[in-house]
Image (cartoon, rainbow, N blue to C red):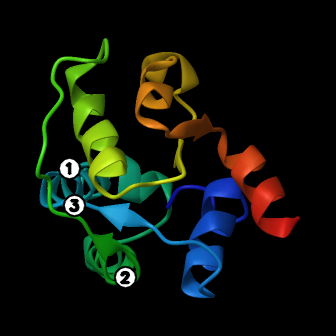
């Protein structure tokens, strides 16, 4: 949302074009909406509250909904990252794409999920 020319935005465009699948659980969707709706985030992106709502709604429409059948808490240092791991594992994701590599460490690999920086994900999408 804050970097329309960055790697994260390129991943969203790839999802729009059907090249990748985004996964989202209900807790993760609520978290995305809460974070994006904070004025310090949407104002930094040059968006209004109404535009931010459209942005979040569009992201959720692009994503495949995942039901969380199994919880593996606690596995990570930051409890806020647990819902990302749970969504990835329950959705049989290939990877979690994040700038927070250190926060996830090796734990996702225990479940067969890689962790990539957005730029690395884009490189894989383009290859």
Kindly identify which residue carries mark 3: 29
Can you identify the residue that label 1 sits on?
31
Q: Tell which of 100 and 52 is nearer to you.
A: 100
Locate residue 71 relative to residue 29 in the image: left or right.
Answer: left
Are there few (<14), some (14-19), or many (20+) residues within 10 Å of tag 3?
some
Q: Position of residue 111 (x, y in %)?
A: 41, 34
Which residue occupies 27% across, 55% down?
32
99 above or below 57?
above
Above or below, 29 relative to 94: below
| 122 shown above or below 57 | above
Q: Which residue is drawn at 14% across and 61% down?
A: 26
Residue 118 percent coordinates (x, y):
66, 47
Secondary-structure class at tag 2: helix
Name the residue nearer the viewer: 82 or 50.
82
Does residue 40 appear left or right of residue 120 in this picture? left
Disc 2 + disc 1, Cβ < 8 Å: no
Sooner in the amino-acid sequence: mark 3 or mark 2 = 3
Q: Residues within 10 Å of mark 1 (few under 14, many from 20)?
A: some
Residue picked out by circle 2 = 58
Q: Quadrant of residue 85?
A: top left
Q: Which of marks 2 and 1 is nearer the N terminus?
A: 1
Real-space Cα distance between discs 3 and 2? 12 Å
Residue under the image location 49 percent in, 61 percent down: 1
Label 3 residue SS = helix
Asked whether disc 3 touches disc 1, contact meaning CB atoms under 8 Å apart, the reply is: yes
């Amino acid at each position: 949302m804050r970097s329309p020319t960055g790697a994260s935005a390129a991943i969203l465009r790839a999802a729009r074009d059907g090249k990748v699948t985004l996964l989202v659980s209900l807790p993760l969707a609520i978290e995305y909406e809460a974070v994006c709706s904070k004025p310090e985030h949407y104002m930094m992106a040059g968006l209004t509250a109404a535009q931010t709502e459209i942005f979040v709604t569009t992201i959720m429409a692009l994503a495949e909904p995942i039901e969380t059948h199994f919880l593996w808490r606690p596995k990570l240092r930051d409890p806020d990252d647990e819902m990302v791991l749970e969504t990835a594992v329950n959705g049989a994701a290939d990877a979690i794409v994040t700038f927070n590599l250190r926060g996830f460490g090796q734990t996702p690999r225990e479940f067969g999920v890689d962790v990539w920086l957005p730029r690395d994900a884009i490189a894989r999408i383009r290859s």
